[in-house]
Amino acid sequence: MATLEITEPMFAETIENNTLVILDFWAEWCGPCRAYGPIYERVSEEFPDVVFGKIDTEDQQALAGMFNIRSIPTTIAFKDGIGVFMQPGALPEDALRDLVGKLQELDMDEVRAELEAQEADDD
């Protein structure tokens, strides 16, 4: 599956209706973003069951603001609707491929239990 251009109206639906969503926050004027784009595209083709989305920070400023994006490119991942990864900077191809594999194996029951424990500590 090729990468999807994600806009604010479809953002929540994309996160909620897919098991694993990886997002690339980028901008046309950003040199590192342009270098990362083909890598991101190649890796997306290796994982047809994963949604790879691209969010243009110039066009989708509200989404960029929602995630407090300060540096681009930034890669963010959601699994089962929960944000599980965020890293500014372009990832090398092997690192992105490894990340997708680790995210696919991630035990979301453990993640939910950790989140519940953190919330209990905050009370």
Image (tube, helix red, strand yellow):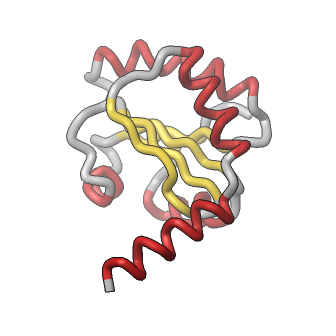
Q: Is residue 43 above or below residue 106?
A: above
Q: Quadrant of residue 2?
A: top right
Q: Residue lying farthest left?
A: 70
Q: Measuring 69% from the left and 54% from the top, which residue is drawn there? A: 107
Q: Quadrant of residue 53?
A: top right
Q: Residue lying farthest right?
A: 49
Q: Position of residue 35 (x, y in %)?
A: 41, 13
Q: Position of residue 57 (x, y in %)?
A: 31, 42
**Left or right of 109, for residue 26:** left
Q: How many marks?
A: 0
Looking at the rendered image, the quarter that the C terminus falls into is: bottom left
Q: Measuring 69% from the left and 33% from the top, which residue is drawn there? A: 101
Q: Is residue 114 above or below residue 107?
A: below
Q: Measuring 67% from the left and 48% from the top, which residue is drawn there? A: 106
Q: Measuring 25% from the left and 52% from the top, which residue is drawn there? A: 68
Residue 19 or residue 17, whichever sits in front: 19
**Left or right of 41, for residue 17:** right
Q: Position of residue 45 (x, y in %)?
A: 72, 25
Looking at the rendered image, the quarter that the N terminus falls into is: top right
Q: Is residue 20 above or below residue 123?
A: above
